[in-house]
Structure formats: C-alpha cells, structure tokens
Amino acid sequence: MTTGLSLDEGKVIEGRPKALRDKVLIVFSNKVFNREEILFEVFGVEDNAGKQVHRGVDWTTKYYTVTIDVYVDSFSNLEDWTNEFCDPDFDELRDVIAGWIIVLPFSGNIEEETKALSRLVNNATSEDFFTAILATELNVGKNERAFLEYNVLAGAVELVHNELDSDGELKEVNGVDRVKEIIDTCDWHPRLLRTAHLESETGMESACTGISLAQIMGSLREARTKYMAMDPGLDREEFANEMANELSKLL
Amino acid sequence: MTQIKYMLLVSRQGKVRLMRWYSAYDSKGKSKISRELATMVLARKAKMCNILEYQDHKVVYKRYASLYFICGISSDSDNELLTLEVIHRYVEAMDSYFNNVCELDIIFNFTKAYEILNEVLVCDGSMTETSKQAILRSVMTMDSLETSDSLDQVLS
C-alpha cells in the first residue's frame, strides 16, 4: 500500500518518492560523425573527451530558465541499446529523464532500426517525457520511410530531419532547431522553472528592462500618491490606465 | 454556415494544448476523443487529406508548425472547407496577437488563446467574427481593462 506524499506532490511509487525530471538523455549512433557539433548546437556544451554527464546546463527560453543535466550515451547497435534501455534495471533512469533524443542516420535497409525503434516506442515512451529521433541522414526507400514514420509518429515520437516537410506555409522548423523546440515545450516541473516573474519577486533585475523590483514598487507608490490626490473623474481614470500600461510593460 | 462540435490543439508530441467543446460530451467521451484523435492525426503524413471520418461525424484538421488544429464537425450539415478557413482565421488572429505565435506562447498564455478563440467562435460552435482587426480589438480592450483593473486593485 502506498501512503504519504512524495516530493512531486504526487504518489510515492514503490516506496520511493517520484523524482523531478531534470535530465535529458541524448544518444548518438557511432555512425554520427558530427556529434560534438550537434551537442554544442543543442545544449551549448562541449564534448570533452567523450564526457557523459554535463551537469547544471541552463536551458533558457523567452518564458523561463531551467537547469538540467545532459546525459550523453552512444551505441554501435541500436537493438542492443534499446534492449538495455527498456530493461527494468533502467526504470530509475526513465523515472528521472525529462526526455530522450536518439541521433542516428538512416540509410539502406533500416528493418533492424525500425524494429528496435518500435520496441522503444512501445516500452520507453510516456506522457511524462518528450521523445525525439534526430535523423542525420534519411536515405531510404519510400515504403521503408513510410513504415518508419508510421511506427514512430503513432507513438508520438518525433522523427526530426533537416529535409522533412520543409514547407514554408507551415512555418516549420526542422533538424536541430526542432529538437530545441521540443525541449522548450517540455512539461518541466514548476519547481524546476525559473520565470522572469519569479526572478523579479526575489529582487533580481529583469533581463529585458534592467529595472529592479524596488524601482517598480517606487513608481507604483508615486503613482498611487498622485492618483489619490486627483479628483475622481475621467482624468483620474485615464491616468490610472496610463500608469497600468506603463507598469505592466516593466513587469 | 458551419457549427463546430469541438476544437483541439495537439502538439506533435501528442500533448493537448487547448480544447474547447461546443457540443455536450461527458468527460469519458472527451478524453476518448482527444486521445484517439491525437493518435490518428499524428500518424497521418503531410500530403494526406485533412478531412477524415470519425465516429458519427467528420474531423477536419490542419497543421501549423508543430501544432495540429483539429475540429469535429457534423457529417451532413457542415462545410469542411469553411472549417479549414475558421481554423486559419483563428491561427492568423493568434499570430497577429503574439507576433508570430509558437507553441510556447500558447502554453504560457493559454488564457489569451482561449479568449481569442471565444472571439472567433461562439458557444454553439458557429463563427461569430471574421474580421481579424475586430477580434484583436476586442482582445486588446479586454487586456487594457484587465490591466486597469489590476492597477485599481493595487491603488485601492
């Protein structure tokens, strides 16, 4: 029987509290030769002598910043890696990752890759984390490609490739940019998020305006004094609106 | 005239970002529809038809960047092409409001996304406003009222 609350304000799973998902797993095929480049483009980290864990990487969007750990792995055989990753021994890892990204080229006969990825889609996907496959090359027959796309897309695993559906009307981003977008829209736990609003609450300066909370509160007090001194009427309302707009820009 | 039964916004990752129901469905029915449609629509390729039959009605969807806009319409009385136009109008209005809207804008400003949708479609699912300017004007007016109300609260 499970009792009590976990750290995640949810249930305790099998006697251990549910951890915050603040790790991103990126896995490279040995056939990917620009691994350093991809790692740097996506996370801004350098692949120093095959370093496997990059801690404290800040991921920043226009709405929030989150500090994550980037786990880097590689494989020579996708099926072996998939079997290992889907193994119950790796439950703990799957419980803490915010998402996984597999980087590999597809060329020639991809039957084995498709089979391995289907297994991954069925066993290692969840609503709790994002999943993406970054294809550095997609040089396969129409049928193989359709089968692969159907298998992974139905499991909400995105197949990202530079050449895929580059339709201007859709305003779609592809390749590494799409991978970054996927990470941007990940459902981070609120406790991991640092928003501009929270930063201003703690007295930090706003990145956009450079104005501190103390200055904003000062302006607000001045506005209030002036507002109270004015006669009720249209002028006072207009002043209130003006100040509201001005202050909302600062906030 | 077209009357939409529901509108869903689903990301390519299969997450429902927004949903509005214009016909009566119980919560079980709603979750069944959103789950099944997300899977069905995501598995469709870009060149496939944007109209499909589902349960007793039709579903019209359109993909914009990483988001799928999915609408359920009546099989016999509603116009599929008009529904695509309604979706496009909504996207255009959001695009203007957010200045090049992206999924992140909708996640962090979902109330605005709903407000814009309320200006486009009324509660029975029919289109209430076609002018983008009029839609934006209404939303901006609401914004300024909200800001002024917040300030009034602080000042009082």
Image: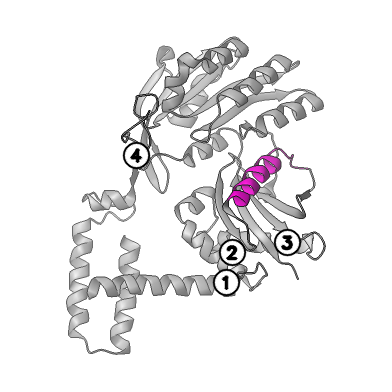
Query: At label 1, which amino acid type do we have?
Result: Ile
| Label pair 1/4, CB-CB below 8 angstroms | no
Q: Which residue is mark 1?
A: B135
Q: Which residue is mark 3?
A: B83
The answer for how far apart the CA atoms under marks 2 and 3 are is: 15 Å
The answer for how far apart the CA atoms under marks 1 and 4 are is: 40 Å
- How busy is the neighbourhood of tag 2: few (under 14 within 10 Å), some, or many (20 plus)? many
Is A197 included in the stretch rendered in magenta? Answer: no
Determine if residue A13 is in view. yes
Chain for disc number 2: B
Is B29 included in the stretch rendered in magenta? Answer: yes
Pick the residue in front: A224 or A148: A148
- How busy is the neighbourhood of tag 1: few (under 14 within 10 Å), some, or many (20 plus)? many
Residue at 32% x, 88% y: name it.
A234
Tell which tag, 2 or 3, sits nearer the viewer.
Answer: 3
Residue A212 rendering spot, x and y as whole percentages? 22, 55
Task: Provide the major secondary structure of the magenta segment.
Answer: helix
The answer for how far apart the CA atoms under marks 3 and 1 are is: 18 Å
Tell which tag, 2 or 4, sits nearer the viewer.
Answer: 4
Q: Which residue is mark 2?
A: B93
Q: Which residue is mark 4?
A: A9
Asked if residue B28 is positioned above or below residue A88 in the image, the reply reads below
